[in-house]
């Protein structure tokens, strides 16, 4: 409900600000994903499109960067941003709370940043992400560390599951953990491969 009618500019100022860990480390995060020209990358829960723009650069003219979100306002905002910045390889997609709505076997990499904890139906959503990946496609998840005594009160109250529970849910949905990146302090960053 929180994102049903968001103000794009207000959220852009919040999401894309120095001091937010994933924004500060965005270029290192994208580099770690080893995205190659020609790939199809889906930014699920794209928000204001900060990562979509970077994926667009990496995949090049022969690739596709898909910005997917459950908020039509975010989708429209990213469409306008892509037009302004002349990002011809950006596509947008309005997803649902149980289905990302990505075409079957269509993407090489799905990226989910600070969004997994918003999945109210994680097994249904993970099934749709699994179906959308090409064989050996990857799912990269960045989400908040939920550690009593270390994580903020906001995280402890807001985030549904910690890293171990998230990994268990994803592995139960037909993924194999591929690698973990130690780039972040407030968030974990784990890649999975579709089995």
Image: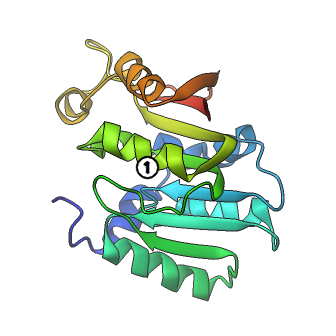
Residue found 50% across the figure and 25% down from its top: 185
- Quadrant holding the C terminus: top right
Residue 102's spot in the image, x, y percent? 50, 61
Query: In the figure, 61 relative to 136: above or below?
Result: below
Residue found 35% across the figure and 20% down from its top: 165
* Residue furthest out toward the top: 149
| Residue 84 in sight from this viewpoint | yes
| Residue 182 in sight from this viewpoint | no
Name the one closer to the observer, 7 or 98: 98
Residue 81's spot in the image, x, y percent? 54, 80
Residue found 24% across the figure and 31% down from its top: 160
Relative horizontal placement of residue 60, taking residue 143 as reference (left or right): right
Residue 100's spot in the image, x, y percent? 41, 57
Query: In the figure, 135 relative to 77: above or below?
Result: above
Residue 10's spot in the image, x, y percent? 32, 70
Query: In the figure, 158 relative to 63: above or below?
Result: above
- Quadrant holding the N terminus: bottom left
Name the one closer to the observer, 84 or 13: 84
Relative horizontal placement of residue 79, taking residue 158 as reference (left or right): right
Q: How is the image coloured?
A: rainbow
Name the one closer to the observer, 105 or 169: 105
Please name the residue that numbered disc 1 is placed on.
Answer: 128
Q: Name the secondary structure under disc 1.
A: helix
Relative horizontal placement of residue 32, taking residue 192 as reference (left or right): right
Judge the density around disc 1: few (<14), some (14-19), many (≥20) Cα neighbours within 10 Å: some
Residue found 31% across the figure and 61% down from its top: 96
């Amino acid at each position: 409900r929180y994102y049903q009618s968001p103000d794009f500019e207000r959220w852009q100022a919040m999401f894309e600000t120095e001091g937010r860990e994933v924004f500060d480390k965005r270029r290192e995060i994208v580099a770690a994903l080893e995205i190659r020209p020609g790939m199809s990358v889906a930014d699920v829960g794209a928000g204001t499109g900060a990562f979509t723009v970077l994926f667009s650069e990496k995949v090049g003219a022969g690739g596709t960067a898909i910005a997917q979100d459950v908020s039509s306002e975010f989708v429209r905002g990213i469409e306008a941003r892509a037009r302004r910045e002349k990002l011809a390889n950006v596509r947008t997609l309005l997803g649902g709370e149980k289905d990302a709505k990505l075409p079957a076997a269509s993407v090489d990499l799905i990226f989910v940043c600070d969004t997994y904890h918003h999945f109210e139906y994680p097994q249904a959503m993970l099934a749709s992400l699994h179906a959308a990946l090409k064989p050996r496609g990857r799912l990269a998840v960045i989400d908040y560390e939920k550690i009593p005594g270390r994580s903020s009160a906001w995280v402890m109250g807001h985030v549904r599951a910690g890293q171990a529970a998230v990994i268990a849910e994803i592995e139960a949905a037909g993924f194999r953990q591929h690698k973990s990146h130690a780039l972040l302090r407030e968030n974990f960053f784990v890649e999975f491969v579709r089995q």
